[in-house]
Amino acid sequence: MRVTYLTGERVYLRAMVEADKDVGIAWWPGPFLVNAARAEEWLKEEHKEFYTKRTHWYAIVRVADEAVIGSVELQDRDHRRGTVVFHMAPALAAADVLRADALRLVVPWVRDDLELMVLTLVCAADETETLAAARELGMDESVRLREFVARPGGRVDRVFMEMLNKPWRVEAADEALAQAETEAPHA
């Protein structure tokens, strides 16, 4: 079930299948744990009208052992704007690194194959590897919600990173943006 363009060195993405119900804790989008019966019910409902839905789910699978370690939620609004949200296994030590690897697979696919005009990534400010990968892929921070995400030691900001696809860019605006970044680089 692997496709080349969604396969990286450490992770690959694939469609969610009913068998993923047994590892719902790794990919479940909610804040609380889920049992296999509820996960199966959700998967069946989600797959009912896959091609007409605006939100698509993909499993993040670790290449080394074929373990499902998370999911990618891709929301497609009017076939122009997309939003990507990752859900990773809560006890996964390398979640941030693996999430960044998955992002490096998602962005070129959404940008080049799906040709969405704007792609937005939603993540937490302490997901530094993911944010670095987003910047490396050409995304810019657009919104920061202060202390939005609860963590065991306190709260961190929720960050929205965005990228405008090249066919919709205006060259003069790109030059002005590059000049502004040169004069006042991001921290």
Image (cartoon, rainbow, N blue to C red):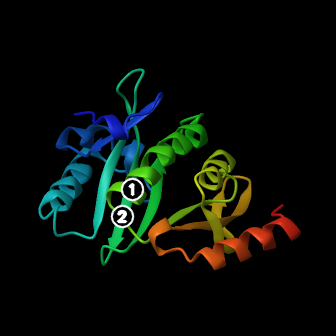
Q: Position of residue 100 (x, y in %)?
A: 56, 44
On the question of residue 50 being in view, the answer is: yes
Check the image and name the residue furthest to the top.
Answer: 64
Q: Which mark is residue 112?
A: 1
Residue 185 coordinates in the image, percent (x, y): 84, 64
Depth check: give the residue in front, 68 or 165: 165
Residue 75, percent from left and from top: 36, 67
Whether residue 169 sits left or right of residue 12 in the image: it is right
Q: Residue at x 21, y 53 (%)?
A: 43
Determine whether the residue tagged by mark 1 lies in a helix, strand or loop.
Answer: helix
- Marking on residue 176: none
Whether residue 74 is situated above or below residue 71 in the rendered picture? below
Q: Is residue 90 above or below residue 126?
A: above
- SS at mark 2? loop
Depth check, front residue: 145 or 32: 145
Amino acid bearing label 1: Asp
Residue that numbered label 2 is attached to: 115
Residue extending farthest to the front is 171
**Residue found 73% across the figure and 59% down from its top:** 154
Looking at the picture, how far across and down is residue 117, in whole percent?
Answer: 42, 72
Q: Quadrant of residue 78?
A: bottom left
Position above or below: 113 against 88: below
Using the rendered view, name the quadrant where residue 44 is placed: bottom left
Q: Quadrant of the C terminus?
A: bottom right
The amino acid type, in three-letter code, at marker 2 is: Glu
